[in-house]
Amino acid sequence: MNDFPYPEIQSFERLQVSDGLMINSERWRLAHEYHQQRQNVQFQSLFLPGIICGLGVAPIEAPADLPAKFRDGRWVQIQPGIAIDLYGNFIVVPTPLDFRISTAAYDRQIELVYLVLSYVDPAKLKRAASNEVLVETFRVNEKTDPPVDTDIEICRIAIAEGGLEIQKPADLFVPTLSELDMRYRLKAKLRPENTIRIAYFRDHPNSDRPNSDRQNLEIAIHQNFKFLGQAISSLAPSLSLADKIGNLDLQAELTPSQLLPYQLIYLNNAQAATLNEATQLALREYVDHGGLILIETDIHNTKLENLLAVKYELQSANAKLKKNSASQFNDQFNGSGADYSSMQAEIQSEIEAISIEVQSQADEFLATFKSNLPMEAPMRNFAELERNHPLRSQPFLFANLPMIIEQPIQVLTNGGIITIFGFLSELWGGLADIQELSREQIRTFQELGINILNYAAQRHAIASSMQINPKYASNATATSDQRRITNMTAS
Protein backbone atom coordinates (compact mmCIF):
# COMPACT_ATOMS: atom_id res chain seq x y z
CA MET A 1 0.00 0.00 0.00
CA ASN A 2 1.16 3.52 -0.76
CA ASP A 3 2.28 5.48 2.28
CA PHE A 4 0.08 8.56 1.88
CA PRO A 5 0.94 11.47 4.23
CA TYR A 6 -1.32 12.92 6.89
CA PRO A 7 -2.49 16.55 6.56
CA GLU A 8 -0.28 19.43 7.59
CA ILE A 9 -0.71 20.42 11.23
CA GLN A 10 -2.06 23.96 11.27
CA SER A 11 -4.92 25.80 12.94
CA PHE A 12 -8.20 26.52 11.17
CA GLU A 13 -9.15 30.13 10.55
CA ARG A 14 -12.72 31.25 9.90
CA LEU A 15 -14.58 34.47 9.42
CA GLN A 16 -15.74 36.19 12.61
CA VAL A 17 -19.35 37.19 11.96
CA SER A 18 -21.03 40.09 13.76
CA ASP A 19 -24.01 42.38 13.20
CA GLY A 20 -23.38 44.93 10.49
CA LEU A 21 -20.61 42.94 8.81
CA MET A 22 -20.33 43.88 5.15
CA ILE A 23 -19.90 40.93 2.80
CA ASN A 24 -17.47 41.37 -0.06
CA SER A 25 -15.81 38.84 -2.37
CA GLU A 26 -12.79 38.37 -0.11
CA ARG A 27 -14.89 37.62 2.98
CA TRP A 28 -17.17 35.35 0.99
CA ARG A 29 -14.13 33.45 -0.28
CA LEU A 30 -12.70 33.17 3.24
CA ALA A 31 -15.97 31.74 4.59
CA HIS A 32 -16.13 29.09 1.87
CA GLU A 33 -12.45 28.17 2.02
CA TYR A 34 -12.84 27.38 5.71
CA HIS A 35 -15.41 24.67 4.97
CA GLN A 36 -13.36 23.39 2.03
CA GLN A 37 -10.26 23.13 4.21
CA ARG A 38 -12.12 21.25 6.96
CA GLN A 39 -13.52 18.80 4.43
CA ASN A 40 -10.09 18.19 2.93
CA VAL A 41 -8.40 17.68 6.31
CA GLN A 42 -11.15 15.34 7.47
CA PHE A 43 -10.83 13.18 4.36
CA GLN A 44 -7.02 13.10 4.39
CA SER A 45 -7.07 12.14 8.08
CA LEU A 46 -9.55 9.27 7.80
CA PHE A 47 -9.49 8.01 4.23
CA LEU A 48 -7.16 7.11 1.37
CA PRO A 49 -7.51 8.48 -2.16
CA GLY A 50 -8.68 6.43 -5.10
CA ILE A 51 -11.45 5.61 -7.51
CA ILE A 52 -15.00 5.64 -6.20
CA CYS A 53 -16.77 4.37 -9.30
CA GLY A 54 -16.34 4.18 -13.07
CA LEU A 55 -13.27 5.65 -14.80
CA GLY A 56 -12.72 2.59 -16.94
CA VAL A 57 -10.34 2.76 -19.92
CA ALA A 58 -11.07 1.09 -23.26
CA PRO A 59 -9.19 1.05 -26.59
CA ILE A 60 -11.09 2.75 -29.43
CA GLU A 61 -10.71 3.59 -33.08
CA ALA A 62 -9.20 6.98 -33.82
CA PRO A 63 -11.75 9.73 -34.51
CA ALA A 64 -12.36 9.98 -38.26
CA ASP A 65 -12.21 13.78 -38.39
CA LEU A 66 -8.54 13.97 -37.36
CA PRO A 67 -5.55 14.30 -39.71
CA ALA A 68 -4.15 10.98 -40.95
CA LYS A 69 -1.00 11.17 -38.80
CA PHE A 70 -3.14 11.02 -35.64
CA ARG A 71 -5.40 8.19 -36.80
CA ASP A 72 -3.50 5.30 -35.24
CA GLY A 73 -3.89 2.64 -32.58
CA ARG A 74 -2.96 4.91 -29.68
CA TRP A 75 -6.48 5.99 -28.74
CA VAL A 76 -8.35 5.07 -25.57
CA GLN A 77 -11.61 6.27 -24.10
CA ILE A 78 -11.90 7.18 -20.42
CA GLN A 79 -15.33 6.28 -19.08
CA PRO A 80 -17.38 8.56 -16.79
CA GLY A 81 -16.74 8.14 -13.10
CA ILE A 82 -15.76 9.69 -9.78
CA ALA A 83 -12.53 9.64 -7.80
CA ILE A 84 -11.23 11.56 -4.82
CA ASP A 85 -7.65 12.71 -4.38
CA LEU A 86 -5.39 12.81 -1.34
CA TYR A 87 -6.74 16.19 -0.21
CA GLY A 88 -10.39 15.24 -0.45
CA ASN A 89 -11.04 16.94 -3.79
CA PHE A 90 -13.57 15.14 -5.96
CA ILE A 91 -12.57 14.38 -9.54
CA VAL A 92 -15.69 13.98 -11.68
CA VAL A 93 -15.52 12.84 -15.30
CA PRO A 94 -19.12 13.47 -16.45
CA THR A 95 -18.87 12.19 -20.03
CA PRO A 96 -16.66 9.77 -22.01
CA LEU A 97 -13.32 11.31 -22.91
CA ASP A 98 -11.19 10.27 -25.89
CA PHE A 99 -7.45 10.42 -25.28
CA ARG A 100 -4.39 9.64 -27.41
CA ILE A 101 -1.20 8.16 -25.89
CA SER A 102 1.61 10.19 -27.45
CA THR A 103 4.63 8.77 -25.57
CA ALA A 104 7.10 6.84 -27.73
CA ALA A 105 9.81 4.35 -26.79
CA TYR A 106 13.31 4.49 -28.27
CA ASP A 107 16.48 2.38 -28.49
CA ARG A 108 14.60 -0.89 -28.02
CA GLN A 109 13.67 0.17 -24.49
CA ILE A 110 10.30 -0.67 -22.95
CA GLU A 111 8.60 2.45 -21.64
CA LEU A 112 5.93 2.30 -18.95
CA VAL A 113 3.24 4.93 -19.44
CA TYR A 114 0.92 5.93 -16.59
CA LEU A 115 -2.47 7.47 -17.37
CA VAL A 116 -3.55 9.60 -14.42
CA LEU A 117 -6.19 12.12 -13.39
CA SER A 118 -5.60 15.11 -11.14
CA TYR A 119 -7.89 17.74 -9.64
CA VAL A 120 -7.79 21.28 -11.00
CA ASP A 121 -8.98 24.21 -8.90
CA PRO A 122 -11.14 26.31 -11.26
CA ALA A 123 -10.31 29.47 -9.30
CA LYS A 124 -6.71 29.18 -10.52
CA LEU A 125 -7.66 28.97 -14.19
CA LYS A 126 -7.94 31.92 -16.52
CA ARG A 127 -11.61 32.61 -17.12
CA ALA A 128 -13.99 35.31 -18.19
CA ALA A 129 -14.86 37.68 -15.36
CA SER A 130 -18.55 37.44 -16.26
CA ASN A 131 -18.80 33.75 -15.28
CA GLU A 132 -20.88 33.42 -12.13
CA VAL A 133 -20.62 29.64 -11.87
CA LEU A 134 -17.33 27.75 -11.76
CA VAL A 135 -17.25 24.10 -12.74
CA GLU A 136 -14.66 22.07 -10.85
CA THR A 137 -12.57 20.21 -13.38
CA PHE A 138 -9.66 17.83 -13.79
CA ARG A 139 -6.62 17.17 -15.91
CA VAL A 140 -5.65 13.98 -17.77
CA ASN A 141 -1.92 13.31 -17.95
CA GLU A 142 0.26 10.60 -19.40
CA LYS A 143 3.61 10.29 -17.68
CA THR A 144 6.61 7.99 -17.62
CA ASP A 145 7.38 8.69 -13.96
CA PRO A 146 5.37 6.89 -11.25
CA PRO A 147 2.27 8.79 -10.09
CA VAL A 148 2.66 11.30 -7.27
CA ASP A 149 0.39 11.47 -4.23
CA THR A 150 -2.07 13.86 -5.91
CA ASP A 151 -2.51 11.65 -9.00
CA ILE A 152 -5.22 9.05 -9.48
CA GLU A 153 -3.92 6.26 -11.69
CA ILE A 154 -6.57 4.82 -14.01
CA CYS A 155 -4.34 2.73 -16.26
CA ARG A 156 -0.77 1.93 -17.27
CA ILE A 157 0.62 0.59 -20.54
CA ALA A 158 4.01 -0.90 -21.40
CA ILE A 159 5.08 0.23 -24.88
CA ALA A 160 8.02 -0.68 -27.09
CA GLU A 161 9.77 1.00 -29.99
CA GLY A 162 7.76 1.05 -33.21
CA GLY A 163 4.05 1.14 -33.90
CA LEU A 164 1.62 1.00 -30.99
CA GLU A 165 -1.73 -0.76 -31.13
CA ILE A 166 -3.39 -0.54 -27.71
CA GLN A 167 -5.44 -3.64 -26.90
CA LYS A 168 -7.30 -5.30 -24.09
CA PRO A 169 -5.12 -7.91 -22.34
CA ALA A 170 -5.56 -11.56 -23.24
CA ASP A 171 -4.85 -12.38 -19.58
CA LEU A 172 -6.26 -9.70 -17.29
CA PHE A 173 -3.72 -10.47 -14.56
CA VAL A 174 -0.66 -10.74 -16.84
CA PRO A 175 -0.89 -7.95 -19.43
CA THR A 176 1.92 -7.72 -21.96
CA LEU A 177 3.24 -5.03 -24.32
CA SER A 178 0.63 -2.60 -25.66
CA GLU A 179 -2.07 -4.08 -23.42
CA LEU A 180 -4.06 -2.12 -20.84
CA ASP A 181 -2.85 -2.81 -17.30
CA MET A 182 -5.57 -2.08 -14.74
CA ARG A 183 -4.05 -3.96 -11.78
CA TYR A 184 -2.75 -0.92 -9.92
CA ARG A 185 -5.90 1.19 -9.77
CA LEU A 186 -6.48 2.23 -6.16
CA LYS A 187 -9.95 2.30 -4.64
CA ALA A 188 -10.90 4.99 -2.13
CA LYS A 189 -11.12 3.45 1.35
CA LEU A 190 -10.61 3.96 5.06
CA ARG A 191 -7.09 4.82 6.18
CA PRO A 192 -5.55 1.98 8.25
CA GLU A 193 -4.47 2.75 11.80
CA ASN A 194 -0.81 2.01 11.04
CA THR A 195 1.15 1.91 7.81
CA ILE A 196 4.38 0.04 8.50
CA ARG A 197 7.54 1.06 6.67
CA ILE A 198 10.33 -1.48 6.56
CA ALA A 199 13.88 -1.55 5.23
CA TYR A 200 16.52 -4.21 4.76
CA PHE A 201 20.30 -4.22 4.56
CA ARG A 202 21.75 -5.04 1.16
CA ASP A 203 25.27 -6.30 0.61
CA HIS A 204 27.63 -4.01 -1.27
CA PRO A 205 28.33 -5.05 -4.90
CA ASN A 206 31.99 -5.46 -3.95
CA SER A 207 31.23 -7.87 -1.10
CA ASP A 208 32.35 -11.50 -1.06
CA ARG A 209 28.83 -12.73 -1.86
CA PRO A 210 28.37 -13.50 -5.61
CA ASN A 211 26.15 -11.02 -7.46
CA SER A 212 23.61 -13.72 -8.34
CA ASP A 213 23.25 -14.77 -4.69
CA ARG A 214 22.97 -11.16 -3.58
CA GLN A 215 20.28 -10.39 -6.14
CA ASN A 216 18.36 -13.58 -5.34
CA LEU A 217 18.42 -12.68 -1.65
CA GLU A 218 17.02 -9.21 -2.32
CA ILE A 219 14.30 -10.63 -4.58
CA ALA A 220 13.37 -13.17 -1.91
CA ILE A 221 13.10 -10.46 0.76
CA HIS A 222 10.76 -8.41 -1.43
CA GLN A 223 8.63 -11.44 -2.30
CA ASN A 224 8.35 -12.65 1.28
CA PHE A 225 7.21 -9.28 2.60
CA LYS A 226 4.90 -8.86 -0.40
CA PHE A 227 3.11 -12.11 0.51
CA LEU A 228 2.82 -10.92 4.10
CA GLY A 229 1.50 -7.54 2.97
CA GLN A 230 -1.17 -9.26 0.87
CA ALA A 231 -2.27 -11.30 3.88
CA ILE A 232 -2.53 -8.19 6.07
CA SER A 233 -5.32 -6.67 3.97
CA SER A 234 -7.69 -9.51 4.90
CA LEU A 235 -6.30 -10.77 8.20
CA ALA A 236 -5.57 -7.41 9.88
CA PRO A 237 -7.12 -4.52 7.90
CA SER A 238 -6.19 -2.02 10.62
CA LEU A 239 -2.56 -2.49 9.50
CA SER A 240 -0.91 -2.01 6.14
CA LEU A 241 2.57 -2.54 4.76
CA ALA A 242 4.06 0.25 2.67
CA ASP A 243 4.65 -0.91 -0.90
CA LYS A 244 8.14 0.51 -1.10
CA ILE A 245 10.72 -1.42 0.92
CA GLY A 246 13.77 0.66 1.74
CA ASN A 247 17.28 -0.68 1.28
CA LEU A 248 20.32 0.25 3.34
CA ASP A 249 23.92 -0.13 2.23
CA LEU A 250 25.68 -2.50 4.61
CA GLN A 251 29.07 -0.88 3.97
CA ALA A 252 27.87 2.73 4.32
CA GLU A 253 28.25 4.67 7.57
CA LEU A 254 24.57 5.22 8.24
CA THR A 255 23.10 7.98 10.40
CA PRO A 256 19.99 7.89 12.60
CA SER A 257 18.13 10.16 10.15
CA GLN A 258 18.43 7.43 7.51
CA LEU A 259 16.95 4.79 9.83
CA LEU A 260 14.25 6.62 11.80
CA PRO A 261 11.64 6.74 8.97
CA TYR A 262 11.23 2.95 9.28
CA GLN A 263 9.35 1.06 11.97
CA LEU A 264 11.21 -2.18 11.25
CA ILE A 265 14.67 -2.94 9.84
CA TYR A 266 15.47 -6.45 8.61
CA LEU A 267 18.87 -8.11 8.34
CA ASN A 268 20.44 -11.55 8.70
CA ASN A 269 23.00 -12.73 11.23
CA ALA A 270 25.92 -12.54 8.77
CA GLN A 271 25.13 -8.88 8.08
CA ALA A 272 24.70 -8.14 11.79
CA ALA A 273 28.20 -9.47 12.43
CA THR A 274 29.79 -7.05 9.92
CA LEU A 275 28.12 -3.75 10.84
CA ASN A 276 30.53 -0.81 10.95
CA GLU A 277 30.84 1.37 14.05
CA ALA A 278 28.84 4.33 12.70
CA THR A 279 25.92 2.09 11.74
CA GLN A 280 26.07 0.37 15.14
CA LEU A 281 25.66 3.74 16.88
CA ALA A 282 22.85 4.73 14.51
CA LEU A 283 21.01 1.46 15.22
CA ARG A 284 21.29 2.06 18.97
CA GLU A 285 19.64 5.45 18.59
CA TYR A 286 17.09 3.91 16.23
CA VAL A 287 16.05 1.37 18.87
CA ASP A 288 15.96 4.09 21.56
CA HIS A 289 13.47 6.01 19.37
CA GLY A 290 11.13 3.01 19.07
CA GLY A 291 12.51 1.20 16.04
CA LEU A 292 12.54 -2.60 15.84
CA ILE A 293 15.40 -4.69 14.42
CA LEU A 294 14.42 -8.10 13.01
CA ILE A 295 17.31 -10.56 12.57
CA GLU A 296 16.92 -13.91 10.84
CA THR A 297 19.68 -16.38 11.67
CA ASP A 298 20.57 -19.25 9.35
CA ILE A 299 20.66 -22.49 11.35
CA HIS A 300 20.43 -24.91 8.43
CA ASN A 301 22.51 -28.07 8.99
CA THR A 302 23.51 -26.98 12.50
CA LYS A 303 23.22 -28.62 15.90
CA LEU A 304 20.63 -26.01 16.91
CA GLU A 305 18.36 -27.00 14.03
CA ASN A 306 18.54 -30.65 15.07
CA LEU A 307 17.87 -29.81 18.72
CA LEU A 308 14.83 -27.70 17.84
CA ALA A 309 13.47 -30.51 15.66
CA VAL A 310 13.92 -33.06 18.46
CA LYS A 311 12.33 -30.69 20.98
CA TYR A 312 9.35 -30.21 18.69
CA GLU A 313 8.94 -34.00 18.31
CA LEU A 314 9.06 -34.48 22.07
CA GLN A 315 6.52 -31.71 22.66
CA SER A 316 4.20 -33.24 20.06
CA ALA A 317 4.58 -36.68 21.64
CA ASN A 318 3.90 -35.25 25.10
CA ALA A 319 0.74 -33.53 23.87
CA LYS A 320 -0.53 -36.77 22.29
CA LEU A 321 0.30 -38.66 25.46
CA LYS A 322 -1.72 -36.24 27.57
CA LYS A 323 -4.65 -36.61 25.20
CA ASN A 324 -4.48 -40.42 25.30
CA SER A 325 -4.06 -40.37 29.07
CA ALA A 326 -7.24 -38.35 29.48
CA SER A 327 -9.26 -40.70 27.27
CA GLN A 328 -7.93 -43.80 29.05
CA PHE A 329 -8.76 -42.28 32.43
CA ASN A 330 -12.35 -41.73 31.38
CA ASP A 331 -12.70 -45.33 30.18
CA GLN A 332 -11.17 -47.26 33.05
CA PHE A 333 -9.49 -46.95 36.41
CA ASN A 334 -6.41 -49.15 36.42
CA GLY A 335 -2.65 -48.96 36.55
CA SER A 336 -2.30 -47.49 33.06
CA GLY A 337 -2.66 -43.97 34.46
CA ALA A 338 0.57 -44.36 36.41
CA ASP A 339 2.32 -45.57 33.24
CA TYR A 340 1.19 -42.49 31.35
CA SER A 341 2.31 -40.22 34.17
CA SER A 342 5.78 -41.75 34.30
CA MET A 343 6.13 -41.49 30.52
CA GLN A 344 5.05 -37.85 30.59
CA ALA A 345 7.51 -37.09 33.38
CA GLU A 346 10.32 -38.75 31.42
CA ILE A 347 9.48 -36.83 28.23
CA GLN A 348 9.19 -33.57 30.15
CA SER A 349 12.60 -34.18 31.70
CA GLU A 350 14.09 -34.68 28.24
CA ILE A 351 12.39 -31.50 26.97
CA GLU A 352 13.89 -29.50 29.82
CA ALA A 353 17.36 -30.93 29.17
CA ILE A 354 17.14 -30.14 25.46
CA SER A 355 15.85 -26.63 26.24
CA ILE A 356 19.04 -25.94 28.18
CA GLU A 357 21.13 -27.16 25.25
CA VAL A 358 19.03 -25.08 22.82
CA GLN A 359 19.68 -21.98 24.90
CA SER A 360 23.40 -22.72 24.95
CA GLN A 361 23.53 -23.11 21.17
CA ALA A 362 21.44 -19.95 20.67
CA ASP A 363 23.84 -18.00 22.88
CA GLU A 364 26.72 -19.11 20.67
CA PHE A 365 24.96 -17.68 17.61
CA LEU A 366 24.11 -14.45 19.44
CA ALA A 367 27.73 -14.02 20.51
CA THR A 368 28.77 -13.56 16.86
CA PHE A 369 26.91 -10.23 16.56
CA LYS A 370 25.76 -9.32 20.07
CA SER A 371 28.43 -6.65 20.54
CA ASN A 372 27.32 -4.83 17.36
CA LEU A 373 23.73 -4.23 18.47
CA PRO A 374 21.89 -2.92 21.55
CA MET A 375 21.51 -6.36 23.14
CA GLU A 376 22.54 -5.62 26.72
CA ALA A 377 19.04 -6.51 27.93
CA PRO A 378 18.53 -10.28 28.20
CA MET A 379 16.88 -12.05 25.28
CA ARG A 380 13.65 -13.78 26.24
CA ASN A 381 12.22 -16.87 24.59
CA PHE A 382 8.85 -16.52 22.85
CA ALA A 383 7.34 -19.04 25.27
CA GLU A 384 8.53 -16.96 28.24
CA LEU A 385 6.67 -13.82 27.16
CA GLU A 386 3.52 -12.86 29.04
CA ARG A 387 0.32 -14.19 27.50
CA ASN A 388 -0.84 -10.62 26.82
CA HIS A 389 2.47 -9.55 25.25
CA PRO A 390 1.76 -8.05 21.78
CA LEU A 391 4.00 -10.62 20.07
CA ARG A 392 1.90 -13.45 21.48
CA SER A 393 -1.56 -11.92 21.51
CA GLN A 394 -2.08 -9.03 19.07
CA PRO A 395 -3.88 -9.40 16.82
CA PHE A 396 -3.54 -13.21 16.93
CA LEU A 397 -3.20 -15.29 20.09
CA PHE A 398 -0.41 -17.89 20.24
CA ALA A 399 -0.17 -20.35 23.12
CA ASN A 400 3.09 -21.70 21.70
CA LEU A 401 5.42 -20.93 18.84
CA PRO A 402 4.19 -22.60 15.62
CA MET A 403 6.69 -24.97 14.04
CA ILE A 404 7.18 -27.58 11.36
CA ILE A 405 9.72 -30.30 12.01
CA GLU A 406 11.50 -29.89 8.65
CA GLN A 407 12.12 -26.19 9.24
CA PRO A 408 12.13 -25.41 12.99
CA ILE A 409 12.33 -21.85 14.26
CA GLN A 410 13.06 -20.15 17.57
CA VAL A 411 12.16 -16.57 18.47
CA LEU A 412 13.99 -14.44 21.06
CA THR A 413 13.45 -10.78 21.90
CA ASN A 414 14.64 -8.10 24.30
CA GLY A 415 12.12 -5.47 23.23
CA GLY A 416 13.98 -3.57 20.54
CA ILE A 417 15.43 -6.61 18.78
CA ILE A 418 13.75 -9.81 17.61
CA THR A 419 16.06 -12.65 16.63
CA ILE A 420 14.57 -15.53 14.68
CA PHE A 421 16.62 -18.73 14.44
CA GLY A 422 15.52 -20.17 11.12
CA PHE A 423 13.83 -18.42 8.20
CA LEU A 424 10.30 -17.47 9.18
CA SER A 425 9.98 -15.07 6.23
CA GLU A 426 10.29 -17.95 3.74
CA LEU A 427 7.15 -19.51 5.21
CA TRP A 428 4.93 -16.45 4.59
CA GLY A 429 4.60 -17.39 0.94
CA GLY A 430 4.81 -21.17 1.36
CA LEU A 431 8.32 -21.14 -0.12
CA ALA A 432 9.90 -23.72 2.16
CA ASP A 433 12.35 -25.86 0.19
CA ILE A 434 11.94 -28.98 2.30
CA GLN A 435 8.22 -29.65 2.04
CA GLU A 436 5.00 -28.27 0.68
CA LEU A 437 3.17 -26.34 3.35
CA SER A 438 -0.54 -26.64 3.90
CA ARG A 439 -2.77 -23.60 3.66
CA GLU A 440 -3.32 -23.76 7.43
CA GLN A 441 0.42 -23.77 8.11
CA ILE A 442 1.05 -20.82 5.79
CA ARG A 443 -1.76 -18.86 7.45
CA THR A 444 -0.37 -19.61 10.92
CA PHE A 445 3.11 -18.33 10.03
CA GLN A 446 1.59 -15.28 8.33
CA GLU A 447 -0.31 -14.53 11.54
CA LEU A 448 2.95 -14.71 13.49
CA GLY A 449 4.53 -12.32 10.97
CA ILE A 450 1.60 -9.93 11.35
CA ASN A 451 2.05 -10.02 15.13
CA ILE A 452 5.67 -8.95 14.60
CA LEU A 453 4.62 -6.06 12.33
CA ASN A 454 1.89 -5.01 14.76
CA TYR A 455 4.40 -5.05 17.61
CA ALA A 456 6.77 -2.89 15.55
CA ALA A 457 3.97 -0.42 14.81
CA GLN A 458 2.85 -0.20 18.45
CA ARG A 459 6.39 0.17 19.75
CA HIS A 460 7.17 2.92 17.24
CA ALA A 461 3.91 4.79 17.92
CA ILE A 462 4.32 4.75 21.70
CA ALA A 463 7.97 5.81 21.58
CA SER A 464 7.26 8.55 19.01
CA SER A 465 4.55 9.95 21.27
CA MET A 466 7.23 10.69 23.87
CA GLN A 467 9.70 12.41 21.53
CA ILE A 468 10.11 16.11 20.72
CA ASN A 469 9.37 16.57 17.03
CA PRO A 470 12.56 18.02 15.48
CA LYS A 471 10.45 19.72 12.82
CA TYR A 472 9.11 22.14 15.43
CA ALA A 473 12.12 22.29 17.74
CA SER A 474 13.56 25.29 15.87
CA ASN A 475 10.34 27.23 16.52
CA ALA A 476 10.35 26.54 20.24
CA THR A 477 11.46 30.07 21.07
CA ALA A 478 8.74 31.69 18.98
CA THR A 479 6.06 33.62 20.85
CA SER A 480 2.83 31.66 21.06
CA ASP A 481 -0.24 31.93 23.27
CA GLN A 482 -0.65 28.15 23.01
CA ARG A 483 2.91 27.17 23.91
CA ARG A 484 2.45 27.23 27.70
CA ILE A 485 -0.78 25.91 29.12
CA THR A 486 0.48 24.59 32.47
CA ASN A 487 -1.52 25.73 35.46
CA MET A 488 0.96 27.97 37.31
CA THR A 489 -1.44 29.13 40.02
CA ALA A 490 0.33 29.28 43.36
CA SER A 491 -0.91 26.76 45.87
Image (tube, grey):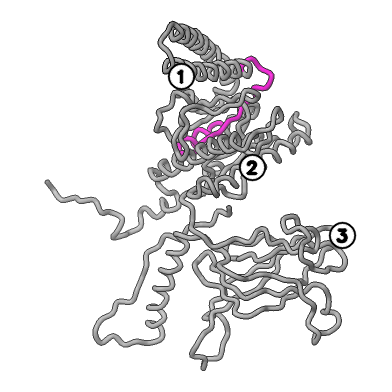
Disc ID at residue 107: 3
Q: Are marks 3 and 2 in contact (CB under 8 Å)?
A: no
For this view, does 393 lie left or right of residue 62?
Answer: left
Left or right of residue 254, residue 176 in this image: right
Q: In the image, is residue 94 part of the stretch drawn in magenta?
A: no
The magenta region covers 280-304
**Residue marked by disc 1:** 327
Tag 3 secondary structure: loop
Is residue 253 visible to the viewer in this orientation of the structure? no
The residue that label 2 is drawn on is 247
In the image as oriented, which residue stretches furthest toward the front?
332
Numbered badge on residue 134: none
Question: Going 72% across and 76% down the picture, which residue do you hit?
Answer: 99
Mark toward the start of the polypeptide (2 vs 1): 2
Q: Is residue 479 above or below residue 269?
A: below
Q: Mark 1 or 3 closer to N-term? A: 3
Element under label 1? helix
Residue 244 visible within the image: yes
| Left or right: where 435 falls relative to 314 | right
Residue at the spot x=28%, y=79% of the render?
17
Residue 439 vs 364, above or below: the answer is below
Query: Given the image, on which type of amino acid does mark 1 rest?
Result: Ser
Q: Residue at x 34, y 87 (%)?
A: 23
Q: Position of residue 211 (x, y in %)?
A: 78, 35
